[in-house]
């Protein structure tokens, strides 16, 4: 009894059309060695001591409210002394932040567990060696002492909302909240929770923020656990 399937397979594998199909697949679906994170030689993010930035250098458009604001804004940001409007926005955000630290189950849970691994976000940084002054290229020059320790509030350029600064010593890391981009207490809660999850990953695990896989994993965790991915949140956007 003949085996037509065998002959059919043999003829298909040797036909020119089969090889064209195979070459097309190789082009569309690259091998592991040709993926972007295998080719990348330039670090995704420099861990400058006085540069508060998110693990992702440029936040994704349409992402978390705590991350990206003012897409398409044409105004040019120039660092300047804090204005009256920025002062009011900062004081409002600080007031909301203190309330969340006292009453938000999510913020209390995250801050407690950060402290358990030696990264208390409410520790006041040493003013002589502080790693938390805002980045003068993208945030306001004025840097008051934050009521929440290493969670700093300042005015920022229109395209920024918040960021996590990962330091070599995890306990010296910090969070920047752009007070002039925060419009509600719920938005601030998501922003702080999002960055605290990055901080937890940095304190608990050996995260290499220049590794795209590590970045993606932490971003997915932060977006999922902070409430960024709620239906109501996305619907409101």
Image (tube, helix red, strand yellow):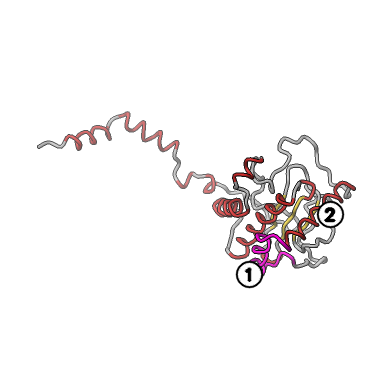
Q: How crowded is mark 1: few (under 14 residues within 10 Å), some or many (20 or more)?
A: few
Q: Where is residue 170 in the image (x, y as percent from the top left)?
A: 66, 65
**Residue at screen point 24% across, 36% down:** 9
Q: Nearer the viewer, residue 157 or 50?
A: 157
Q: Hey, which quadrant is residue 145 in on the image?
A: bottom right
In this rendering, does residue 169 appear at all? no
- Label located before the other in sequence (1 or 2): 2
On the rendered structure, is 45 left or right of 122?
A: left
Residue 147 location, x and y as percent?
A: 80, 62
Q: Are marks 1 and 2 in contact (CB under 8 Å)?
A: no
Residue drawn where x is 70% and y is 54% of the image:
189
Q: Mark 1 points at which residue?
A: 117
Magenta segment range? 102-122
Type of secondary structure dominating the magenta stretch:
helix
The Cα atoms of the two marked residues, 1 and 2, are separated by 30 Å
Q: In the orientation shown, which residue stands out farthest toward the left?
A: 1
Q: Which of 75 and 38 is in front in this view?
A: 75
At mark 1, the secondary structure is loop
Q: Is residue 161 magenta?
A: no
- The residue wearing badge 2 is 91
Q: Quadrant location of the C terminus?
A: top right
Which quadrant would the N terminus be assigned to in this image? top left
> Which mark identifies residue 48?
none
């Amino acid at each position: 009894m003949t085996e037509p399937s065998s002959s059919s397979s043999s003829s298909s594998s040797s036909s020119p059309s089969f090889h064209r199909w195979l070459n097309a697949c190789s082009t569309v679906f690259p091998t592991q060695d040709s993926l972007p994170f295998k080719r990348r030689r330039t670090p995704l993010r420099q861990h400058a001591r006085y540069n508060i930035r998110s693990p992702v250098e440029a936040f994704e458009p349409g992402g978390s409210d705590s991350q990206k604001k003012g897409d398409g804004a044409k105004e040019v940001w120039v660092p300047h002394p804090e204005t009256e409007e920025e002062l009011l926005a900062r004081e409002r955000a600080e007031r909301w932040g203190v309330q969340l630290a006292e009453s938000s189950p999510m913020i209390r849970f995250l801050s407690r567990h950060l402290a358990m691994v030696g990264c208390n976000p409410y520790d006041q940084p040493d003013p002589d060696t502080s790693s938390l002054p805002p980045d003068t290229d993208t945030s306001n020059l004025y840097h008051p002492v934050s009521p929440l320790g290493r969670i700093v509030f300042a005015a920022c350029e229109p395209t920024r909302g918040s960021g996590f600064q990962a330091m070599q010593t995890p306990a010296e890391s910090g969070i920047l909240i752009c007070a002039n981009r925060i419009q509600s207490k719920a938005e601030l809660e998501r922003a702080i929770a999002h960055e605290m999850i990055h901080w937890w990953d940095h304190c608990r695990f050996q995260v290499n923020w220049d590794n795209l896989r590590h970045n993606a994993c932490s971003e997915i965790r932060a977006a999922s656990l902070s409430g960024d991915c709620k239906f109501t949140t996305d619907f409101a956007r």
